[in-house]
Amino acid sequence: MDAPIYLPAVAYEAPAILPYKLAVRAVSCGELIADPQAWAIVLKHMPMARMLASQSEWLLGTMTLADFALFAGGLDPKLEAAIDGELGRLPLANPQ
């Protein structure tokens, strides 16, 4: 059996994360809350989302708005499309 040949660790280059669009199913609630423009859009369509801000940082960093909506019966596709439409008009998010 042949062993794989790996490049030396000094040759490693971290992958570049490109700017991306914010979307209900694509980013965490924490990221939406951290962007004032995005959060204003979410609250305009889902005022009850305000109570998400009191959740633990761990949950906010790992769950999307669509994930949280499952606890209330899911996210209406029309509502999701409306939020994503407005989020899509915002400038691309820069990776942190």
Image (cartoon, rainbow, N blue to C red):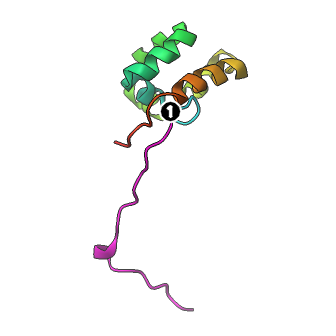
Label total for image: 1
Q: Which residue is rendered at x = 38% and y = 20% of the image?
A: 36
Q: Position of residue 37 (x, y in %)?
A: 41, 20
In the image, residue 26 lies at what x, y percent? 55, 36
Q: Label 1, secondary structure: give it.
A: loop
- Furthest toward the bottom, the residue is 1
Q: Which residues are magenta?
A: 1-21
What is the x, y in percent for residue 4? Answer: 49, 84
Q: Please tell me which residue is depicted at 53% across the width and 91% down the height of the picture.
A: 2
Q: Is residue 12 above or below residue 81?
A: below
Q: Residue 88 lies in what quarter of the image?
A: top right
Residue 25: x and y in percent read: 59, 33
Q: Inspect the image, locate mark 1, and give the three-letter code of the amino acid beneath it.
A: Leu
* On screen, residue 1 above or below 36: below
What residue would you read off at disc 1? 22
Q: Quadrant of the C terminus?
A: top left
Q: Is residue 17 visible?
A: yes
* Prevalent SS, magenta region: loop
Residue lying at the far top in this picture: please name it.
Answer: 47
Q: Is residue 59 above or below residue 6?
A: above
The answer to whether 47 appears left or right of 95 in the picture is right
Q: Is residue 56 magenta?
A: no
Residue shown at the point (44%, 19%) measured from the top left: 39
Q: Could one spot residue 68 in this view of the protein?
A: no
* Residue 12, image quadrant: bottom left
